[in-house]
Amino acid sequence: FKVEHGLSNSLMLHHVMRFNAADARAAQWYAEIAEIAEIAEIAPLPTEAPCTSDDIDETGLTGLGAEGRVARVRALVAALQRLPTELNLPTRLAQVGVRERDIEGLATQAMMQTRLLPNNPRPVSLDDARALYAAAL
């Protein structure tokens, strides 16, 4: 697929952040980013499940209280989910030519990115990669 790097990031980032928010360290980072960026809680797009408290490991969310930090993580994920729409960019992988039958190949290729995967805050399995691509389809 000939999809620009930035566009592929906009298509996948909120899915990956929702996935990674289950890691306490990542959830803490996301909450801090939302606080620095002054992102307040906003409603998620109606077509996708929001990032819920169940998606977020609250054990690392200390300081301002876990509830407020969870709200910040949800707000950050929702803001990044809305951004492509606001910029009139594609919002689904299908809009750039990816089909369901392509998911297996994309997931397999993603698992070969050995310089990137070790830096992800949460381990990613082949099944996880498939699920992330399916969510973005």
Image (tube, grey):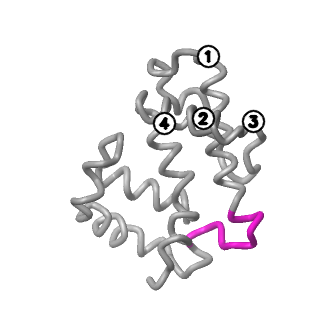
Which residue appears at 61% of the width and 32% of the height? Answer: 52
Binning the other alpha carbons within 10 Å of mark 2 as few (below 14), some (14 to 19) or many (20 upward) gives many
For discs 3 and 4, the disc positioned in front in the rendered view: 3
Numbered range of the magenta stretch: 84-93
Q: Are marks 2 and 3 in contact (CB under 8 Å)?
A: no
Which residue appears at 77% of the width and 41% of the height? Answer: 43
- Left or right of residue 86: residue 7: left
Q: Are marks 4 and 2 in contact (CB under 8 Å)?
A: yes
Residue carrying label 2: 73
Q: How far apart are marks 3 and 1 (CA)?
A: 14 Å
Q: How far apart are marks 4 and 1 (CA)?
A: 17 Å
Residue carrying label 1: 64
- Of 66 and 46, the residue lying toward us: 66
Q: Is residue 68 above or below residue 81?
A: above
Task: Name which quarter of the figure residue 63 lies in.
Answer: top right
Looking at the rendered structure, the secondary structure element under dot 4 is loop
Give the mark nearer the N terminus: 3 vs 1. 3
Residue carrying label 3: 40
Give the mark nearer the N terminus: 4 vs 2. 4
- Quadrant for the C terminus, please: bottom right
Find residue 28 and report its horizontal and vertical position in percent.
49, 29
Q: Distance between the residues labelled 3 and 4?
A: 17 Å
Give the mark nearer the N terminus: 2 vs 3. 3
Q: How far apart are marks 2 and 1 (CA)?
A: 13 Å
